[in-house]
Image (spheres, coloured by chain):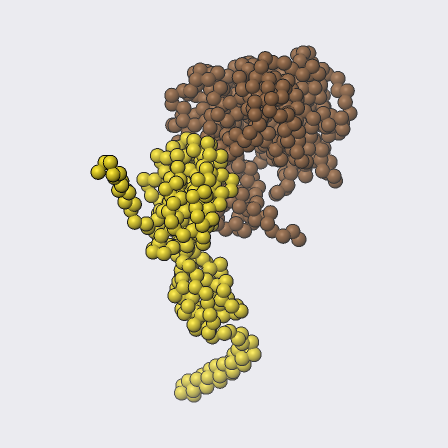
Chain colours: A yellow, B brown
């Protein structure tokens, strides 16, 4: 009885030892050299795996950072400058600071300013709707309002507003990962610099029709009148195919164009409320 | 015994309420809005300018590219403008707008109703004439007919099939045509047989049109022995090209293939008439039969209508807009397109304007798939719609391709039969576009 037990133990131990040796040498022979820094960089990253950096996930981005010559084209939108500084510091490289960005919706045609011309009763999806027709309002460039962008947002930063039928972006939660930009079939969402204290100015319209047609379908459409372009002292505004575009790198946030726009298509965000100018009384009136 | 295709199919009630309304001429409109994209392929190039006087049947835009078709004026008058106007889906398309002044036809069009039986032209001459007259397939897709009648090198046509199935509910334009101009259709078929160099032709008619079958059979046995009338079972989508080939000659079109791969060319009866008129009467394609129907309408009519008539004027011609009308469809209820703007105008392939009430069109609330496989049973292409729907919602484009999503003919049988009201066709159609995009960007081996 005892001999059987001893025999078994010895046999199995020898067998285990032999196999362990084979495994050890095989592992040594076929070892994949991996940079230990990749694990460390991955630990620094936020781990959202959103793909906003253009890589397949955080691990792929970490690998990319370690292998890349310079970190100029590497940017984690979720972590922002702080995380990138940590990554650069760990890897002993320098990195230029990037202005943080945020997504903005370039359509402001709500239910009042952009009346519905038909009722859509199909599957609730902007992608499906855009394969069927140009949209349920007169404007074929505008928001379809079925909420594909809301579904795509992983950070809960984008919500459809039932009052306006348009998506609202929470700038604090938005990480500029770019998922909503890919989801929108009308290409209405754009990244813009967050701006000092979150102040930013943009044209909230994508209508490329001629002024008259645009105005007919939506009262707050950009009609390409060039008034904003003329008033801009910094050459920040360009107009192509009846649509104004403000270059956020050139814009000095003077807000002159906002006042000038006849259709209120230019939006200002996070500015103090305007105080109406006090009328200067003339000498006679005094 | 009526023949039918081998798999799938559904039996919607046919609702052919306009079946006894004889074809009448639609009153001439004041303004004609003629689209330059009335066919599959590149839009035609205008050859007239603003202010030009045009006559009925005059060429106003010529084919631009290999797959394209000529466009002729459907009215006589002055060109008011050439501008992009919204089509029925709201997308801008170049239109030639003509202010109608009288009805002055080109002199070389033979307007007599006498039937020209003798075919004088040779095969290539016929093809050139069809191309010149801008004939396109009137079954729905509006593919230029002269291209369909010239098989690609290495392929040979054996049979011609004339499609008189008209399986879509409500539509009666093809049926009225078969009753009122049967001999013209058969001569049109003979002309196409000559162009294709085939000597066997079938005319498929669904068995819910016994009068048309009897009339056509009588004519064929008397004077057109090469054309055989086939009675088809009433089943949707019997008039689909691939289903018709399966039902009549028992051949299956391969996946991603064309009917010509089985040696068959299918043409609609409306196209046959257009070919007859083009070749024998020198009349370009600028008018067609349009059924204006709907249960909510006080009357249902079949019109011979000029291209470029607005949908609005069609509704007013049959007693105005019914109060409870909720949805307008250009074409049949199964495969037609919803009309989102009534100021859009008809094109060559417009076969019907259908008005439906809210009760008839409202979609039910979407439920969960219970794997009952009714959609699988109904699909005439042998696909699995529930699977494609799931893959589509997960965005798995490559798996969709592997499951033959590109073979879907968008007949709508799956969505019709689904007890859970799942929008199967909507998601599948979207995936088809995505797969096509992927195939186009894929490097060729």
Q: Nearer the viewer, residue B341 or A270?
A: A270
Q: Nearer the viewer, residue A73 or B43?
A: A73
Q: Nearer the viewer, residue A217 or B306?
A: A217
- On the image, which quarter does residue B138 sit in? top right
From the top left corner, tell me how far across and down residue A96 is, in percent.
Answer: 46, 65
- On the image, which quarter does residue A275 sit in? top left
Res. B287 visible in picture: no
Q: Quadrant of the C terminus of chain A?
A: top left
- On the image, which quarter does residue B133 sit in? top right
Q: Quadrant of the N terminus of chain A?
A: bottom left
Left or right, A22 with reference to A255: right
> From what the image shows, is residue B35 above or below residue A240?
above
Left or right, A267 with reference to A56: left
> From what the image shows, is residue B164 above or below residue A24?
above
> From what the image shows, is residue B276 above or below residue A135?
above
Res. B195 visible in picture: yes
Q: Residue at x 60, y 22 (%)?
A: B51
Q: Residue at x 56, y 76 (%)?
A: A30
> From what the image shows, is residue A192 above or below residue A211?
below
Left or right, B308 with reference to A207: right
Q: Residue furthest left?
A: A286
From the top left corner, tell me how far across and down residue B235 is, in percent.
Answer: 53, 29
From the top left corner, tell me how far across and down residue B389 is, in percent.
Answer: 47, 44
Question: How many numbered dots are placed on residues in this image?
Answer: 0
Q: Residue at x 39, y 40 (%)?
A: A260
Q: Residue furthest front?
A: A284
Q: Residue at x 38, y 21 (%)?
A: B323
């Amino acid at each position: 009885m005892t001999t059987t037990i001893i025999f078994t133990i010895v046999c199995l131990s020898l067998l285990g030892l032999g196999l362990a040796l084979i495994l050890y040498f095989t592992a040594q022979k076929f070892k994949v050299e991996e940079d230990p820094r990749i694990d460390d960089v991955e630990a620094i990253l936020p781990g959202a795996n959103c793909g906003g950096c253009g890589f397949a996930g955080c691990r792929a981005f970490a690998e990319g950072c370690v292998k890349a010559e310079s970190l100029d084209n590497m940017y984690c939108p979720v972590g922002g400058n702080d995380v990138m500084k940590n990554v650069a510091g760990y890897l002993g490289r320098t990195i230029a600071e990037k202005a943080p960005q945020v997504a903005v919706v370039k359509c402001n045609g709500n239910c009042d300013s952009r009346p519905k011309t038909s009722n859509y009763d199909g599957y609730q999806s902007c992608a499906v709707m855009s394969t069927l027709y140009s949209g349920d309002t007169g404007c074929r460039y505008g928001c379809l309002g079925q909420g594909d962008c809301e579904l795509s947002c992983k950070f809960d930063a984008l919500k459809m507003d039932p009052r306006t039928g348009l998506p609202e972006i929470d700038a604090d939660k938005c990480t500029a990962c770019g998922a909503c930009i890919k989801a929108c079939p009308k290409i209405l969402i754009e990244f813009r610099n967050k701006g000092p204290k979150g102040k930013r100015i943009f044209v909230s319209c994508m209508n490329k029709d001629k002024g008259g047609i645009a105005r007919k379908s939506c009262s707050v459409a950009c009609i390409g009148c060039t008034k904003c372009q003329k008033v801009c002292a910094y050459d920040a505004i360009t107009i192509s195919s009846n649509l104004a575009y403000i270059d956020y790198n050139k814009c000095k946030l003077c807000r002159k164009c906002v006042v000038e726009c006849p259709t209120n298509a230019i939006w200002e965000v996070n500015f103090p409320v305007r105080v109406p100018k006090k009328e200067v009384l003339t000498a006679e009136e005094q | 015994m009526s023949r039918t295709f081998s798999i799938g199919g559904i039996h919607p009630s046919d609702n052919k309420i306009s079946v006894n309304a004889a074809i009448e001429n639609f009153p001439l409109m004041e303004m004609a809005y003629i689209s330059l994209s009335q066919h599959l392929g590149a839009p035609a190039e205008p050859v007239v300018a603003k202010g030009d006087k045009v006559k009925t049947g005059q060429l106003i835009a010529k084919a631009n590219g290999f797959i394209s078709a000529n466009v002729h004026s459907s009215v006589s008058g002055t060109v008011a403008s050439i501008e992009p106007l919204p089509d029925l889906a709201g997308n801008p398309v170049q239109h030639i707008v003509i202010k109608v002044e009288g009805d002055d036809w080109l002199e070389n069009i033979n307007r007599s109703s006498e039937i020209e039986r003798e075919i004088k032209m040779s095969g290539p001459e016929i093809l050139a004439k069809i191309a010149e007259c801008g004939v396109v397939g009137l079954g729905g897709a509006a593919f230029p007919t002269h291209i369909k009648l010239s098989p690609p090198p290495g392929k040979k046509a054996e049979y011609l099939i004339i499609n008189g199935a008209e399986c879509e509910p409500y539509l009666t334009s093809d049926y009225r045509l078969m009753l009122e101009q049967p001999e013209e259709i058969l001569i049109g078929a003979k002309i196409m047989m000559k162009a294709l160099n085939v000597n066997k032709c079938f005319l498929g008619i669904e068995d819910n049109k016994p009068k048309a079958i009897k009339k056509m059979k009588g004519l064929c046995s008397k004077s057109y022995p090469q054309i055989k009338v086939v009675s088809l079972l009433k089943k949707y989508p019997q008039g689909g090209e691939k289903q018709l080939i399966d039902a009549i000659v028992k051949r299956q079109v391969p996946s991603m293939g064309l009917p010509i791969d089985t040696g068959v060319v299918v043409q609609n009866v409306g196209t046959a008439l257009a070919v007859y008129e083009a070749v024998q009467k020198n009349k370009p394609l600028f008018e067609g039969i349009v059924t204006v129907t709907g249960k909510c309408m006080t009357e249902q009519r079949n019109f011979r209508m000029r291209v470029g008539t607005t949908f609005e004027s069609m509704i007013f011609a049959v007693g105005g807009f019914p109060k409870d009308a909720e949805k307008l469809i250009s074409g049949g209820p199964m495969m037609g397109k919803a009309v989102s703007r009534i100021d859009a105008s008809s094109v060559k392939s417009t076969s019907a304007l259908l008005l439906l009430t809210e009760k008839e069109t409202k979609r039910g609330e979407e439920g969960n798939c219970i794997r009952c496989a009714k959609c699988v049973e109904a699909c005439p292409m042998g696909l699995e719609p529930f699977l494609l729907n799931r893959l589509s919602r997960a965005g798995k484009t490559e798996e969709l391709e592997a499951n033959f999503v590109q073979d879907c003919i968008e007949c709508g049988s799956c969505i019709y039969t689904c007890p859970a009201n799942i929008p199967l066709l909507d998601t599948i159609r979207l995936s088809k576009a995505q797969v096509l995009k992927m195939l186009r960007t894929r490097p060729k081996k």
